[in-house]
Image: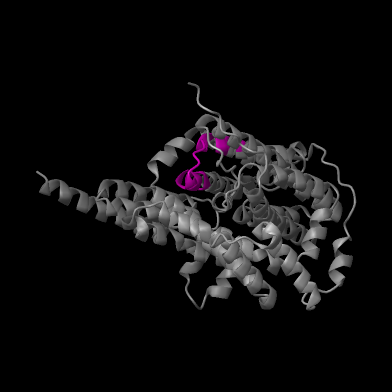
Amino acid sequence: MAAVSTHYPWYKKEDTDAFFALFQNNIANFVIIAITMLGMGFPSSIVYGQVLPGAAVAVMVGNFYYAWSAARLARKENRADVTALSYGISTPVMFVFLFGVLLPAKQLTGDAEMAWKVAVAACFISGAIEAAVSVIGRWVQHHLPRAAMLGAVAGVALTFIAGEMLFKTLEMPVIGLLVLAIIIVGLLARVSMPFRLPTSLFAIILGTAMAYLIGDAGTERFSDAFTHLGFYPLLPNLAWFEGLGLLLTSMLAVLTVVLPITLYNAIETMNNVEAMEAAGDKYDVRECQAVDGAGTMIGALFGGVFPTTVYIATVGAKWMGAGRGYSLLNGAVYALATMFGLIAALAAIIPVSVVAPILVFVGISMIATAFQANETRYYPAVALAMLPYFANYVMVRFSRGAGEVVGDISSAIVVMGQGALFMAILLGAMTVSVIDHQFRRAAAFASIAAGFSFVGLMHAPELSFNAAPEFVMGYLGMALLFMYFFFQEAARQR
């Protein structure tokens, strides 16, 4: 008797909650991009006419592909509860491209259009590198402990998502705390909202209405909202090709920023795919890295300058019970909103404190998953892997001034924040190996950390030889210690 095929819906109520969570994550990045680039001196014609449409194309392509991929997985496993992977611009990568690629290019060339073309070329190369890295993606996933990878993801979730968004929530405490309570009741306790509205939608409607009623949001928001309305067609251009000549000649140094952050992006994708497997949906990490690289390259063809990745919010969407509809809707809405300048309008009308609590939920769901997906004996490894992102958060938020800001606290904060993802994963991997008494494996991870420190992937502001000699010696010392215990245990077993 043939098995009954399970219906996998195009859209369901739970997709609405997940859509608002993913939409807010991406819209926050889009708004930061616009404000920062305008502040750097880039004209609105480039920001609203090229950069944001290019980013929207990448987001649309990736979300549509992952919705199709979810449907394929649902058919393969005959399940209706498959959640599509979220897709968007990685916040840490975005800041690196803003201040490590766009700003230096603008300062060196003195020409906004030329700097934009250089950044487009850098973005295209970044996508090509990630697509190439996908060849070894599954091997890396197999050899890196889950606790290390999920611990690193949890570090991002704690600092850049849950922590950052809790700050935003409390900027309007009367509104923010009420909305946070709605999120906790609806998404954690699974209590139905009035009129059977999705929790996130109900929270946004009520929070926004109250913000205007009690005067926390002024009417000037509406006038600001419609300043940049217009039509910005999604059209390809040759900016990436023109910028390529400049990038590979007079601005070759920019590539020293692109390479490590691309490796970061590839590992972030791997981590988030691993997190989704732990939550119940198994996707091919190599395919996802290739798709992320291709999406980044396509975005660059349309003028985008920011690499895209499988998004950390996916597990939050899984917890919400989302399917593929939220991904399809997110891609379509971003394309339309960018084409007509509606992103800035929406961001201006809805106070950040109203939507921030949704992202607090996304962050805490990621942290919870990192622990739930591992045995209790690996909890210390998860916790240790989270810690480098405290330093990385300071590095990103204070950029070049981080050293002066935190100098009186500790000189180690800056170097710890440089290459935090690599440090998080390798420290977590060493800890897991030691817990399992696999000391030779722990020594191998320590040696890799020494190598990364030597070339500047960790604990250094840029790639160079012998970039962080003290850390090289420190990690080699760890490797020797682990090998001592390896030989000691081997001698006992004879």
How far across and how far down the image is residue 331, in percent?
72, 44
Which one is in front, 100 or 203?
A: 203
How far across and how far down the image is residue 105, in percent?
72, 52
In the picture, measured across the screen, residue 423 lies left or right of residue 297, that is left
Q: Residue at x 76, y 47 (%)?
A: 333
- Quadrant containing the C terminus is top left
Which one is in front, 86 or 285?
A: 86
Q: Residue at x 56, y 47 (%)?
A: 265
Q: Can residue 120 be seen in the rendering of this structure?
A: no
Kindly give the residue lying farthest to the front in the view shown.
1
Residue 172, above or below 342: below
In magenta segment, residue 281: yes
Q: Quadrant of residue 363?
A: bottom right
How far across and how far down the image is residue 283, in percent?
52, 37
In the picture, measured across the screen, residue 232 lies left or right of residue 420, that is right
Q: Start and end of the magenta stretch?
A: 271-291
In the picture, measured across the screen, residue 342 lies left or right of residue 357, that is right
In the picture, measured across the screen, residue 220 lies left or right of residue 320, that is right
The kind of secondary structure the magenta stretch mainly shows is helix
Which one is in front, 135 or 472?
A: 135
Q: Residue at x 71, y 47 (%)?
A: 330
In magenta segment, residue 129: no
